[in-house]
Image (cartoon, rainbow, N blue to C red):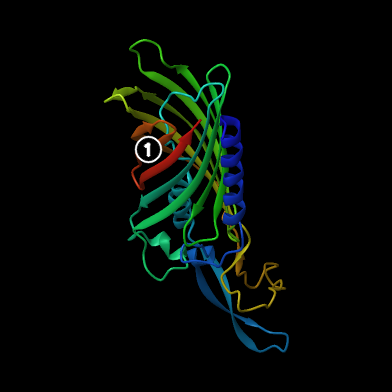
Amino acid sequence: MGRAQRQRVFILTFFMAVLLAAGPALAGDNDLELRRLAERQEVQVLDSAGLPVTRFNALPDLEAFKTLSRDIGVVFAPKFLAPAETLGQAGFDLGVDVSLHMVDGALDHWRALNSADAPNTFVTGQLHVRKGLPFSFELGATLTHLFDSEMFAPGVELKFSLNEGFFYLPDIAVRGAFNVVVGSSDLNLATTGFDISVSKSFGLIGAVNLTPYAGYNQLVVIASSRLLDVAPEDPTQPTINEDTGLLDFQPEFVFDTEIQTINRFFFGTRLLFGVLNLTFEGALTNDVQTYSGRLGFDF
């Protein structure tokens, strides 16, 4: 099988995996119910017959939503999992990544999860395809899935190498990336940002290429909610109080857009065995630590 045929086979396999991953799923422990981030305040109102009944106002916890969206944003944030060097104009890479995200399960905002237990670790899987372009550019596409949830994040990335393969100097690259989370009925979430990385390749025993790398990433998390209701079991629509001109109760609410900037530092090592590559990486923030592994194929 020639090189072009192998590339077509792997591309077809990749997109088949994407279609299978995007199939129907059941709500899992890691799916979100953002109405849990609001307190139900009881109010007494009169029904249509003039009798007193209990209804609810929503008191949203804005700080809890902000910290939840920050942490979930880091979980879905683009992974690096490659040294600064690009693939070259004719290069192509297809890989599968698995990441463990360590979080502080004691934080109150995790009450928004379906799970009854506080989380300590989230696991994501990612399909990642990269294509080399002329002039030291590289284009990539990703599909990330949070296990035990219905949430996916398709994304794109563009990398440019400022220096690669020049004598004894390290390779240096900058990259921009963007993804958007789909599959949640409550949360609107997107992440974007840029990173700069350095790496240097070394040959080992003539059969393995070792490339350690490290870098800095500035991540931007953009989050908001859809329309939420703290009392979904009560279909009664609020009415306007004739004395005040205000709604007599209001169980529906939204969390407005939150934009947060997060600094991440990452480090890793790639082992290249011919067309097969293994990559191990750590990415650190103050609140979430991510440890990833990757199995890929270079052509």
Q: Which residue is drawn at 37% across and 68% down?
A: 117
Is residue 202 visible in the rendered structure shown here? yes
The picture places residue 145, in percent across and down from the top left corner, at 51, 52
Q: Answer left or right for 292 relative to 246.
A: left
Furthest-front residue in view? Answer: 1
Q: Which x, y percent locates residue 84?
A: 42, 25
Q: Quadrant of the N terminus?
A: top right
| Disc 1 element | strand
Tell me where residue 135 appears, x and y as whole percent: 56, 16
Q: Quadrant of residue 212?
A: top left
Q: Which amino acid does the dot numbered 1 rest on?
A: Thr
Q: Which of 41 and 298 is in front in this view?
A: 298
| Residue positioned 61% across, 85% down in the render | 53
Q: Residue furthest left?
A: 205
Number of marks present in the image shown: 1
x and y percentages locating residue 114 in the rendered image: 47, 68
Q: Is residue 190 above or below residue 187?
A: above
Residue 189 visible from this viewpoint:
no
Q: Which of 178 and 95 is in front in this view?
A: 95
The residue closer to the viewer here, 55 or 149, is 149
| Callout 1 crowding tier (Cα within 10 Å): few <14, some 14–19, many ≥20 | many
- Is residue 199 or residue 235 the one in the foreground? 199
Residue at left offset 39%, top offset 30%: 216
Vertical order, 182 against 156 (above or below): below
The residue that mark 1 highlights is: 279
